[in-house]
Image (cartoon, rainbow, N blue to C red):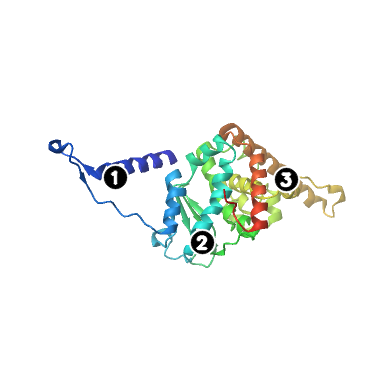
Amino acid sequence: MKTIDKIMKVTLAVLFALSLIQCTEEQENECYERPNVKVSEDPNDVYLQAHIFEPYGTAVRWRWDNRFIKPEERATPIKAEYVIPVTKVLQYFWIELYASQGEAGKKVIKDLFPSELQYIGSSMYEGNGREKLGFAESGTRITITRLNDYDLFDLDWLTGTGAGILSTVHHEFGHIIHMNYGLPEGFKEISSYTGNGWDNITEEEALQKGGVSKYATNGENDAFAETLAHFLLMPKEQFEDKYITLEDCSASDNVEVCQKNNAGRKMIAQKVALIKKLFKEKLHLDLDKMRDEMQTRLEYVVDNGEIPIK
C-alpha cells in the first residue's frame, strides 16, 4: 500500500513536470513554457518539503483543516513556531533512530513511513468530553497531539504512555510494521484480550493479562504496538524490573497476586522475544541495539533541552 502511494506520487509529479513544457511537431525547437507554479515560501513549508516530503513522499498537515477532524471533536491547531522543532524531534527519535541502524533501518523508514502526518496543538476531545490522544488511520495518516506542550526537558511529553509524542509515533509505526509483515507466529495466542473493556481494568490487572499497559489488552495488534513502544522508550532496567523480572512470591504479602503478576510477566517476555525475532528475521534490525540508541538520545535531549545539530 505504501509503495503504491509513492509510485502514484512520483507519477503525478512527472506528469505535472512534463505538462509545463509543450512542443508541437512544427516547432520542435520552440517550446512553450508555462508560468512556474509558486511554491510556498513559508519557512515551515520549506523545511517540511526538504526534510519530509522530498525524501519520504510524506505530507505534513500543520495548518488547520476541518476535513481532518470530526464535527463533534474539539482541538487547537499547532502553533506555527513549533512546526519545525516538532519535526526535528520526529526526525531524531524516529527517522534517524532507524537510519542509525544501517541500510536495513533506512529501508524500513523509506518503505513504511506514513503518507501523511497531522499535527495538532492540543489533545483532541470527543463530543462526550473524552480525551483522544494520537492515533492512526489505515496505516497512512498518523495524527500527533499535544504539540503545543513542546518541552525537550519534559520526559513525559516525549515518552509518556499514550500522550507522549514518541509513544504515539512508535506505537502507530508498530501497527504499520505488523500490517506489512504480519504478527509473529504464535503472538496472538500468548494471552487473552479484553477488547473495548481495556479502560475498565487496572494497570495491575493488565500486567496479569500479559499487557505492558491497559491499552495493550485491547487486542493482539495493540499488544504488539504497545509492547514495541514501551520496549524502545523505557530504560532497560525499568522495563525489565516492571515487566520481565519475576518476583519472589515466598516473600510476598499476597502470594496469589504475586503469582498472577509473574504469569503476566512470562507472557510479556514471550511477546518481546517474538517481536525481537520478527525485527531480526524480517526487518534485519536488532531491537536491543535500537533501544540502547534510543535511550542514549533521550538522555542527551532531556539533559540538554536540545536536539543535537549534525
Q: Position of residue 63 (x, y in %)?
A: 42, 61
> For this view, does 80 lie left or right of residue 99?
left
Query: Which amino acid type corresponds to the residue marked 2 in the rendered image?
Result: Tyr
- Quick one: label 1, few (<14), some, or many (20+) residues within 10 Å? few
> For this view, does 26 lie left or right of residue 79?
left
Q: Which residue is mark 3?
A: 265
Q: Position of residue 26 (x, y in %)?
A: 12, 37
Query: Which amino acid type corresponds to the residue marked 3 in the rendered image?
Result: Arg
Query: Which amino acid type corresponds to the residue marked 1 in the rendered image?
Result: Phe
Q: Furthest residue to the front?
A: 29
- The picture quadrant where one finds residue 265 is top right
Residue 105 higher or lower than 170, as above or below: above
Along the polypeptide, which appears first: circle 2 or circle 3? 2
Q: Position of residue 113 (x, y in %)?
A: 49, 44
Secondary structure beneath dot 1 equals helix
Q: Which mark is residue 16?
A: 1
Residue at 79% across, 50% down: 258
Q: Which mark is residue 82?
A: 2
Along the polypeptide, which appears first: circle 3 or circle 1? 1
